[in-house]
Image: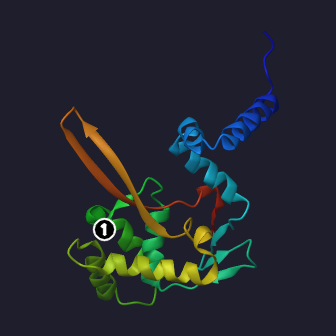
Amino acid sequence: MMERTPEEIAAELASSVRELIAADRKDLLLRAIGTPLLEELRIEAAKAKLSRLLITKDYRFLLADLGNKEIELQPVHKAVYLLFLAHPEGIEFKRLADYREELTRYYMQTAKMMDKAKIMEGVDHLVNPLDNAINEKCSRIKKVFLEMMDEYMASYYIISGHTQKHIAGSSRIWYERLKVITLPRELVVSEI
């Protein structure tokens, strides 16, 4: 039996996809592909449209492939963004206190002229699970990206929710409500 080339497999797959669509059975197509692969394909399709995010030495955020448009954020927003960029696996807001030192370091780097006591106070608000500060900062970041690009494209750059279901044994189920930046990290270019 001769081995088929990837191109031959792709041609056969395309034919099968057309048959399922003609039969109005997209449900079977989705089941065959699976949701995780569908998300990977979505990211692959978006890569051609997404811009590299350049983070300069002086903490400017530029969309390199969109004429170096600057994402204008305050130092606190930059610190939050850098924290989530550094953790592609995601972070739960309720566990932000575990990242206090790292967040403080980013804030100190992005707000060089700011009073240290003010920075520490800002970090306290961000990591307090009873305070809404982190949601406000993420909303502001989202607003800035939405002003520069369409919603689909912005969805890769913003800090958004991702829920993971965990099952321990047969009776215990819990959900991890992670916040992530889904931008493929190979599109992040950092000078820092």
For this rendering, which residue is in front, 112 or 52? 52
Q: Does 130 sit left or right of 66 as displayed?
A: left
How many labels were placed on the picture? 1
Measuring from the top left, give residue 12's x and y in whole percent: 77, 31
Measuring from the top left, give residue 147's x and y in whole percent: 59, 84
Image quarter in which the C terminus is found: bottom right
- Location of residue 184 with respect to 143 vertically, above or below: above
Measuring from the top left, give residue 38's x and y in whole percent: 58, 47
Residue for point 70% across, 39% down: 17
- Location of residue 119 with respect to 84 vertically, above or below: below
Measuring from the top left, give residue 50's x and y in whole percent: 68, 65
Tag 1 residue:
100
Image quarter in which the N terminus is found: top right
Residue for point 65% across, 61% down: 187
* Secondary element type, mark 1: helix
Residue for point 40% across, 71% down: 105
Q: Does 177 sit left or right of 78 as displayed?
A: left
For this rendering, which residue is in front, 1 or 114? 1
